[in-house]
Image (spheres, helix red, strand yellow):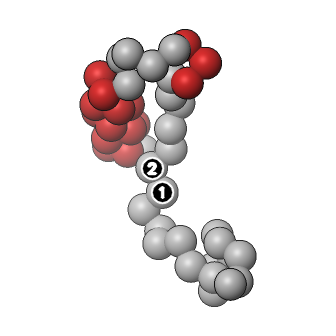
């Protein structure tokens, strides 16, 4: 769990740096790293 939190924090820092000129309402404040692939079979995306 701590490893994923470190990864999430690193990704958030990188994204925040890229979006620093965006207005406050467009800033990303939280994110979640999903290691499982998004597929129709596991229900993470709808079928086409």
The residue sitting at 55% across, 24% down in the picture is 26
Residue 34 is tagged as 1
| Viewer-closest of 32 and 16 | 16
- Confirm or deny contact between disc 1 and disc 2 (CB under 8 A): yes
Residue 12, image x and y in percent?
Answer: 38, 31
The residue sitting at 30% across, 28% down in the picture is 18
- In the image, 30: left or right of 13? right
The residue sitting at 51% across, 28% down in the picture is 28
On screen, residue 34 above or below 3: below
Residue 44, image x and y in percent?
Answer: 64, 70
> Distance between the Cα atoms at labels 1 and 2?
4 Å
Helix, strand or loop under label 1: loop
Instruction: Determine which residue is flagged by label 2.
Output: 33
Residue 13 visible to an observer of this rendering: no
Give the position of the N terminus as an image quadrant.
top left
Number of residues whose C-alpha sits closer than 10 Å to that of mark 1, classed few (under 14), some (14–19) or many (20 or more)? few
Residue 11 visible to an observer of this rendering: yes
On screen, residue 9 above or below 41: above
Residue 14 is tagged as none
Give the position of the C terminus as an image quadrant.
bottom right
The residue sitting at 42% across, 62% down in the picture is 35
Image quadrant in which you'd find residue 6: top left
On screen, residue 13 above or below 1: above
């Amino acid at each position: 769990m701590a490893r994923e939190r470190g990864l999430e924090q690193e990704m958030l820092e990188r994204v925040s740096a890229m979006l620093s000129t965006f207005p406050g309402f467009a800033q990303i404040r939280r994110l979640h790293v999903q290691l499982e692939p998004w597929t129709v079979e596991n229900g993470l995306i709808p079928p086409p």
